[in-house]
Image: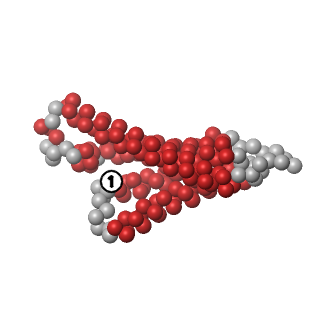
């Protein structure tokens, strides 16, 4: 039987980039609607959140499944955790890089997102930079922790289900 091994790093980067590219339009839609979901009913907001969660669960599970199929139907839990968490974090970084680029291009959106007044010239440059940096640091760290834990939980459950010891 022919032995085939797949580089786990290449697999993580491949599926992480795909996840990041797919999640960018959702982020752009959120920015241009100012993340105001007030036109949805509470049930509609829950459905929207559940659909996003279902997307992440299915995508990470598919990435783990593909690695298992390519790797002669063998995957250990450590590999599943690496794929799930790694793919989520690569997608997270791509999403945040595109957010920074989008806010750099459209500075009015950035000012509204942070809560600056319409006339930014009244603020000192130091105060402006501090508020922008603090807002992005807070958002970045919160999302980093969230996506790490979400990727860990999803990959732990999917990996445990697909786990097969090599004989």
Residue occupying the point 55% across, 57% down: 57
Question: Where residue 109 sits: x, y (%)?
Answer: 26, 49
Instruction: Give the color scheme: rainbow, by chain, secondary structure or one colour.
Output: secondary structure
Judged from the image, the secondary structure of the residue bearing numbered disc 1 is: helix
Residue appearing at x 50%, y 50% in the figure: 150
Image coords of residue 165 (percent x, y): 77, 48
Label 1 packing within 10 angstroms: few (<14), some (14-19), many (20+): some
The answer to whether residue 8 is left or right of residue 106 is right
Residue 69 percent coordinates (x, y): 72, 54
Residue, disc 1: 31
Is there any visible trace of residue 17 in the rendered image? no
What's the residue at 20%, 33% (across, down)? 127
Position of 130 relative to 16 (above/below): above
In this rendered view, identify the residue nearer to me: 57 or 112. Answer: 57
In the image, residue 130 lies at what x, y percent?
25, 33
Do we see residue 121 in this rendering?
Answer: yes
Place residue 3 in its image quadrant: top right
């Amino acid at each position: 039987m022919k032995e085939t091994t797949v580089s786990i790093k290449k697999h993580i980067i491949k599926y992480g980039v795909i996840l990041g590219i797919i999640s960018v339009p959702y982020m752009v839609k959120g920015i241009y609607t100012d993340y105001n979901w007030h036109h949805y009913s509470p049930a509609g907001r829950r459905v929207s959140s559940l659909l996003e969660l279902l997307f992440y669960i299915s995508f990470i599970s598919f990435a783990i499944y593909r690695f298992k199929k390519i790797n002669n139907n063998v995957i250990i839990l450590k590999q599943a955790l690496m794929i799930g968490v790694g793919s989520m974090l690569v997608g997270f970084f791509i999403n945040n890089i595109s957010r920074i680029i989008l806010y750099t291009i459209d500075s009015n959106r950035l000012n509204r997102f942070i809560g600056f007044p319409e006339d930014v010239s009244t603020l000192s440059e130091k105060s402006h930079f501090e508020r922008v940096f603090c807002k992005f640091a807070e958002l970045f760290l919160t999302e980093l922790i969230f996506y790490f834990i979400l990727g860990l939980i999803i990959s732990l459950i999917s990996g445990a289900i697909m786990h097969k010891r090599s004989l």
